[in-house]
Amino acid sequence: MPLEKPQWKELFEEVVTGGLCTGCAACIISCPHDVLDYNTAQGAYKPFHLPVDGGPEDCTHGIKGCTMCTRACPRFRNWETEIDEKRFGRERTDDEIYGQAFTVVLARATDPELAAGGQDGGFVSALLAFALENDHIDAALVSGLEGDGSTWRPAPTVVRNRAEVLATAGSRYTYSANTLAYPAAIEGGAERIALVGMGCMASAPGAMQARKAGKVARRLSLTIGLLCSKTFDDAIFEELFEAKYGITRAEIVKMNIKGVFQLWLTDDRYVEVPLKECHAWTREGCTACPDFAAEHADISTGGIGTFSDWTLTIVRTEQGRELLEAMEAAGAVETRPGDDDPAAIALLRRLAGVSRKRWPATAVEAPRRLPA
Ligand SMILES: Cc1cc2nc3c(=O)[nH]c(=O)nc-3n(C[C@H](O)[C@H](O)[C@H](O)COP(=O)(O)OP(=O)(O)OC[C@H]3O[C@@H](n4cnc5c(N)ncnc54)[C@H](O)[C@@H]3O)c2cc1C
Ligand code: SF4
Ligand code: SF4
């Protein structure tokens, strides 16, 4: 039997039109022939094949043996088990519902600017600044905002220093495929690149490493995950916030989700929008996503729990553990045990289980498995 070489044709059928695609863009940045692009029109957030070299549903490079897009895709076939085995040396047990981890701590930046500019404890920003300043990485792929930020439209962005990290701190709840900033990082000469992203993106480096997807796999050398239940379509600004609450994009200063959609506005105003009103704007790519806890990152971070100015921090790999220890030793971050907030750990387990139930029964079984 000839060796199977799955390529864009299979990716298109099984993932992109098969309801599993998250829009993480890993396939696009891995394509060595530059025949894939990204469609953000009307909330699509999906890759497409340019109308050359095989057209939308097939790829002439794939027919000749190129498999790079399926190697990069963190939703293709047996992705979860393959990445677990590569990253952690073994398959997860069913009880490891939020993925494999050494420890969970609460962490926050000691630098007051980073602590204030960050979404929760500013831990992610402190980590990026520390890693850039101490020669762990050359650049990081994060989410900035278009223009002066008043549209709240995320823009995948490369950061290379503390000021750029600070300028891109905080959370946006619409989708930012930070992977798409990879070519700009390479153009700038970066070889060791951190990727910040929700679970869908945070599994991409592991998929690439497990399936040997070339230089991209080597260069994405650190992965910082963001806990995530869903992202919203950009239309939520006009169709809900403006239509029902009279809030324009430019009036929003900060947003967060803590049981409700919290909006801080200019002139010290504050509005809470019930999450049930927001669900209709859930981005399609999130509806089958089983990964709340960014289970393949080196370190995953979230804001759930009692303490709003600490980042819930899940340390997963040896690399992540060494980095956190180095930050603590340098005084860049302070930590306390995750057990200080048992309700946060319980919620982490619960939300991880809720997401795993979304993975379709028609796809491979592993990402649906739950504790007995
Ligand atoms: C879409 C989304 C959904 C989330 N959902 C949850 C949740 O349900 N429960 C929970 O506990 N935590 C959630 N988080 C994580 C939380 O909001 C914080 O990002 C996390 O706690 C880290 O806080 P921090 O202060 O350390 O981060 P910061 O120091 O503020 O750094 C945040 C980093 O995230 C990047 N970023 C911001 N917005 C986006 C985006 N839309 N896409 C990709 N990267 C982005 C920034 O560029 C920055 O590098 C979510 C985050 C996002 C972006
Ligand atoms: S999940 Fe990501 S890598 Fe897979 S097809 Fe969609 S955009 Fe490409
Ligand atoms: S729920 Fe979050 S992690 Fe999952 S696809 Fe949507 S944005 Fe990505």
Image (cartoon, rainbow, N blue to C red):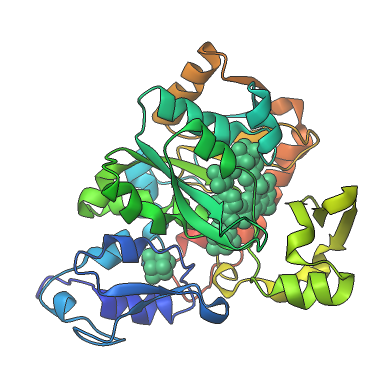
Q: Residue at x 18, y 71 (%)?
A: 5
**288 or 85: which is nearer to us?**
288
Horizontal and vertical percent position of residue 83: 37, 50
Query: Does residue 35 appear in this view?
Result: yes
In percent of width and height, residue 82 lies at 34, 53
Instruction: Name the spot of residue 188 as percent of width and height, x first.
Output: 30, 45
Residue furthest to the front = 148
Q: Is residue 156 left or right of residue 172?
A: left
Q: Is residue 134 above or below residue 272?
A: above
Q: Nearer the viewer, residue 116 or 75?
A: 116
Q: Give the quadrant of ligand 3.
A: bottom right
* Circle count: 0
- Give the quarter of the image for residue 126: top right
Give above or below for 321 relative to 43.
above
Residue 172 located left or right of residue 66? right
Left or right of 50 in this view: 139: right
Report the quarter where the N terminus lies. Answer: bottom left
Q: Residue at x 51, y 58 (%)?
A: 155
Residue 18: percent from left, percent from top: 44, 80
The answer, for residue 352, to whether it is visible in the render is no
**Above or below, 42 relative to 364:** below
